[in-house]
């Protein structure tokens, strides 16, 4: 998803009016959560009746939209203005901003720790520790992804008023205070509230990322730098589930999830506070 996310998000950000950039950023990012939500719905209703082959075709169908995008969606004015003549020129532009690129990679690595560290193992935690059946787990996954979509759009919108960094930090604080309810409470209604609000905060911070990364990236490398930083963030953060799973033997499952995310959120907050912001930057030079 990283490369496509980088190019698609850049096109969306470049084409949008500045005043709508934040909320559109949240909408673009919420596509991840909507996909996760639809996958949970399909796992609950399609898989038991039609089997894994049907899941494969249902999952692959949205990729056909790439053909429509290729032939019908026009290039943005900003891209036409700042288009680099060669791949080498793009790479030279990116290398000339290596400090910005390194910062983006660090931030994206911690953001990957945040999203995958709160989502990937959570269904297994609900099943093995809390003892919920598959239908209950699927329902909770659907619920917290609804929260994720709402959080991405809400905080994306708020970032136009509050600024990118302030809004991201606020969303991270929402996630931080939900950690006890998210893992340490065994009562289903309370745990559902914790999971829902946790993802409001997690994806609330993520909802600002498309706008924030594109505003920080140089014009000629705006298609490359955000997507490449995203991909490297995924690569570096790939062991997150192994790390959390390994911590179980020392801290227990709930303690491992809570401790890892507490440290990660505090570190990510510090990185965002120390970074720059270019909210409202013009992409066309007008």
Image (spheres, rainbow, N blue to C red):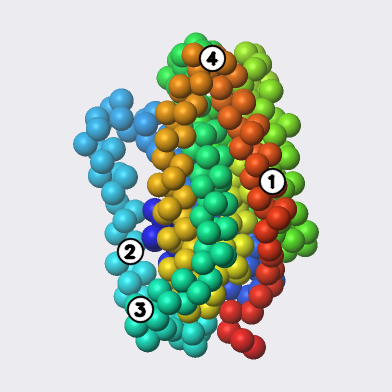
Give the residue at mark 2. 66
Tag in front: 4 or 2: 4
Q: Which of pointers 1 and 3 lies earlier in the amino acid sequence?
A: 3
Query: CA separation, marks 1 and 2?
Result: 35 Å
Q: Which of pointers 2 and 3 lies earlier in the amino acid sequence?
A: 2
Give the residue drawn at x 64%, y 17%.
184
Query: CA separation, marks 1 and 3?
Result: 35 Å
Quarter location, residue 265: top right
Quadrant for the C terminus in the image:
bottom right
**Percent position of residue 245, x then y:** 46, 23
Question: How many badges with numbers are in the image?
Answer: 4
Query: CA separation, marks 4 and 2?
Result: 46 Å
Tag in front: 4 or 1: 4
Q: Secondary structure at mark 4?
A: helix
Give the class, few, some or many, for how many residues have Cα within 10 Å of label 4's Cα (few <14, many ≥20): few
Give the residue at mark 3. 88
Give the residue at mark 1. 269
Q: Secondary structure at mark 1?
A: helix
Give the residue drawn at x 49%, y 63%.
226
């Amino acid at each position: 998803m990283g490369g496509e996310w980088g190019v698609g998000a850049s096109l969306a950000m470049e084409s949008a009016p500045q005043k709508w950039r934040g909320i559109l950023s949240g909408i673009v990012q919420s596509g991840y959560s909507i996909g996760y939500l639809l996958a949970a719905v399909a796992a609950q209703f399609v898989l038991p009746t039609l089997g894994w082959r049907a899941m494969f075709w249902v999952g692959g169908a949205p990729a056909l939209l790439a053909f429509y995008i290729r032939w019908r969606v026009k290039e943005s004015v900003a891209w036409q203005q700042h288009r680099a003549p060669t791949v080498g020129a793009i790479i030279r532009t990116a290398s000339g901003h290596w400090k910005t690129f390194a910062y983006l990679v660090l931030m994206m690595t911690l953001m990957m720790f945040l999203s995958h560290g709160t989502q990937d193992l959570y269904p297994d935690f609900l099943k093995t520790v809390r003892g919920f059946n598959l239908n209950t787990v699927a329902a909770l996954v659907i619920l917290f992804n609804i929260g994720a979509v709402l959080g991405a759009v809400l905080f994306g919108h708020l970032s136009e008023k509050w600024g990118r960094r302030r809004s991201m930090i606020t969303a991270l604080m929402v996630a931080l205070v939900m950690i006890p309810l998210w893992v340490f409470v065994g009562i289903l209604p309370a745990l559902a509230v914790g999971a829902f609000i946790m993802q409001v905060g997690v994806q609330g911070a993520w909802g600002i990322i498309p706008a924030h990364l594109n505003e920080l990236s140089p014009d000629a490398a705006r298609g490359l730098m955000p997507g490449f930083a995203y991909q490297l963030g995924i690569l570096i953060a790939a062991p997150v589930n192994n790390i959390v799973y390994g911590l179980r033997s020392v801290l227990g499952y709930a303690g491992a999830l809570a401790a890892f995310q507490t440290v990660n959120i505090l570190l990510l907050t510090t990185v965002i506070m120390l970074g720059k912001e270019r909210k409202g930057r013009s992409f066309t030079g007008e």
